[in-house]
Amino acid sequence: MNEAERIISDGIDAAQAVITTWGTDYQGKYNLADAVNELEGWARMAIDFMPDPMECTICGGNFDLEKEGGVEGDFGILPVAFCPTCKACIFDFVEQYNEQRPES
């Protein structure tokens, strides 16, 4: 569970606690407005922890580095990120190059 998912889970628990703690209003209904406000606050915090999708330097596609894989780093001073597909293609290209290269 990443940080954003943990915060959302905590927010749901907090909203349930609001309903349980504050109970019901004078008509016997849950005070859902307070629970919703509590949950919205937790959701805003979770958004701050959600990682922005990475953009692949080669294909331009978006990917989630944590969930999908891929790689992020630098070529000299140039920052780069490669999605899992382009990363696999780069590895394959290097392997083909090494097989075709005459031994010195």
Image: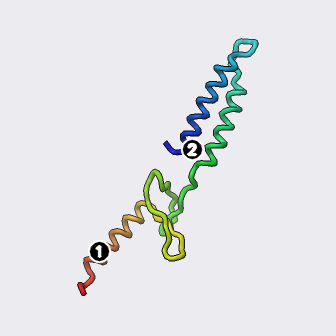
Q: Which residue is at the far top?
A: 27
> Does 27 appear above or below 12?
above
- Quick check: 24 above or below 94? above
Residue 71 % position (x, y):
45, 62
Q: Which of marks 2 and 1 is nearer the N terminus?
A: 2
Neighbours of disc 2 within 10 Å: few (<14), some (14-19), many (20+)? some
Q: In this view, does 77 lie above or below 32?
A: below
Q: For the residue marked with disc 2, what is the amino acid?
A: Ala
Q: Where is residue 12 in the image (x, y as percent from the top left)?
A: 59, 31
Mark 2 = which residue? Answer: 4
At 68% from the left and 17% from the top, the residue drawn is: 23
Q: Residue 43: which disc? A: none
Residue at numbered disc 1: 96
Q: Which of marks 2 and 1 is in front?
A: 2
Residue 26 quadrant = top right
Dot 1 amino acid type: Gln
Residue 70, image x, y percentages: 44, 60
Give the distance between the C-alpha atoms of the residues marked 2 and 1, in whole angstroms: 40 Å
Q: Residue furthest bottom?
A: 104
| x and y, in percent, of residue 37 in the image | 71, 32
Q: Do the residues labelled 2 and 1 touch (CB within 8 Å)?
A: no
| Horizontal side of residue 55 vs 98, given as left or right | right
Residue occupying image coordinates x 42% and y 65%: 86
90 left or right, relative to 59 = left
Count of marks, rendered view: 2
In the drawing, does residue 22 fall left or right of residue 70? Answer: right
